[in-house]
Image (cartoon, rainbow, N blue to C red):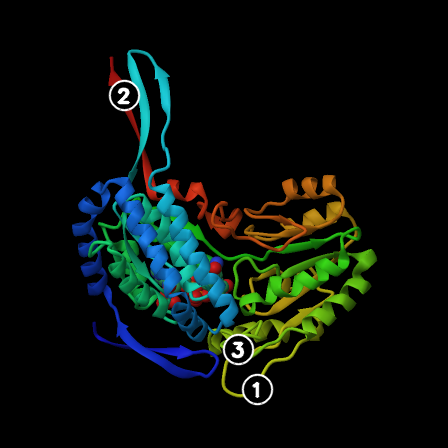
Amino acid sequence: MTDNLAVIEPATEAVLQEVPRAGAADVDAAVERALQAYPEWRALPPATRSSVLHELAGLIEARGDELAVLEARNAGKPISDARGEMGMVAATFRYYAGACERPIGDTIPVSGGQAFTVREPLGVVGLIVPWNFPLVIASWKMGPALAAGNCVVLKPAELTPLTALRFAELAEEAGLPEGVVNVVAGPGSVVGQRLVEHPDVAKIAFTGSTEVGRSIAAGAASSIKRVTLELGGKSPNVVFADADLEAAAAAAPMAVFGNAGQDCCARSRILVESSVLERFMELLEEAVRAIRVGDPLSEETQMGPLISSSHRERVASFVDGDAPVAFRGSAPDGPGYWFSPTVLGPVDPQARAAREEIFGPVACVIPFADEDEAVRLANDTIYGLSGSIWTRDGARALRVARAMDTGVLSINSNTSVRVATPFGGFKQSGYGRELGPHAMDAYTEVKSIFYAT
Ligand code: NDP
């Protein structure tokens, strides 16, 4: 450890806590600890590993309020959201505790004997996570990685390391052997990069920007490391004229402004059938003006500040850009990286605001004429992470759902994430799937065994 990392509270701009800043040597030491712990963790009877993970889930439930306050303050998110997130962290560990004993593999009829497959853990895996949902995204990776028998080295974002550091203490308290879970809090360009380059790290699971994802995939190629990438998005929320417009307009704002828009699943392109555009905009404006932006620790708050001053500057550059402002909500003045929920529209689909991931509380409303144009616009992006379709026509819902190039879709809802269902992207939103049973595949290798008879 060389120096300290001052962790800022986005709602006040004050230093919340100082933590030691890890460097490349700390990564090497963490990987070494993980390698030492791996044989024992891997060989543990599945039922024992399962009960340790259940114990960990129980501890997270018991400390949920403490963790939620830490996350709300460090990431600037509303406390009610942070509490929900800690519930999901616990649920994720419970789900994968169960996965330890789930049947895996196939038996395959072949000549001269019996063939079957088993899945083996990878070894030491490096997990690199962003600042928008710090512990939730870490749990999506740690749950299946640990259940499969791997040891992990987790790198939280420098801006939000606090819940990850606290988590490491809880893992020890839950009875995970020393070295199974390691947290290194330091800059991506040093700590992240060392993990990617480290010869003894078998896999990198990454969530963050497409740009860094690209460099991780390139860096991992030299040692043929396994990689899964969960990257950016520019997801469409498609509202047809026959939809329940009141419900669609009431739900649309928090599908973009939730987590202050810092959400890879944000439905930031609201595509509306032209014949109902005017009515939809009236309903949307009412809903946006009602959003309560303020102190993350207040139970009433629905949206907090942005993560940092530099991020706020980048988000603002889209509002002063090439798309007209339709209306804006309110935000506090004074210290804190506040930003008003903002709706741009009608937006030209070629405008920068309609094409780049803004990752802030800025929505683009884009009109469309018919179903074909809706599908074409929905797919007119380099991304493909999530999306929504609002219609009362069941056949159209299914037609459009199949035609949209996106990893996660909801119909008459804007939800994206469930512990039991796979999550991940098409196109430049990444590859590999998290959550659900599929995530176990991402942390294991298939081994084919032939037994001569
Ligand atoms: P980054 O992709 O830069 O960061 C994500 C994680 O990767 C952080 O832990 C970061 O570390 C680490 N990292 C950065 N550089 C490297 C590297 N060279 N090698 C290994 N790891 C590295 O995202 P940002 O947080 O800077 O956000 C930028 C944009 O990315 C956002 O505006 C948004 O568009 C998108 N994004 C998407 C997310 C998603 O959920 N899909 C989440 C976050 C961002 P550190 O920050 O400590 O330097």
Q: Is residue 225 above or below residue 115?
A: below
Q: Residues within 10 Å of mark 1 (few under 14, many from 20)?
A: few
User: Of marks 2 and 3, which one's residue comes earlier in the chain?
Assistant: 3
Q: Mark 3: is the Cβ under 8 angstroms from ligand 1?
A: no
Residue 442 pos. (x, y %) = 38, 43
What mark, if any, has residue 298 been given in the picture? 3
Q: Is residue 156 above or below residue 203?
A: below
Residue 62 pos. (x, y %) = 37, 63
Q: Quadrant of ligand 1?
A: bottom left
What mark, if any, has residue 157 been given in the picture? none
User: Of marks 2 and 1, which one's residue comes earlier in the chain?
Assistant: 1
Task: State the SS at label 2.
Answer: strand
Tell me which residue sits at (38%, 47%) in the image: 96
**Residue 158 visible:** yes
Task: State the SS at label 3.
Answer: loop
What mark, if any, has residue 450 been given in the picture? 2
Q: Residues within 10 Å of mark 2 (few under 14, many from 20)?
A: some
Residue 129 pos. (x, y %) = 39, 60
Tell me which residue sits at (61%, 59%) in the image: 267
Camera-nearest residue between 303 and 426: 303
Report the Cα–Cα distance between label 3 and label 1. 17 Å
Q: Quadrant of residue 340?
A: bottom right
Location of the N terminus by quadrant is bottom left
Q: In the shown orientation, is residue 198 left or right of residue 291?
A: left
Residue 270 pos. (x, y %) = 68, 59
Q: In the shown orientation, is residue 289 left or right of residue 74?
A: right
Task: State the SS at label 1.
Answer: loop
Report the Cα–Cα distance between label 2 and label 3. 61 Å
Mark 2 against mark 3, which lies toward the viewer?
3
Q: In the shown orientation, is residue 315 left or right of residue 121?
A: right
| Residue under label 1 | 333
Give amino acid for label 3: Ser
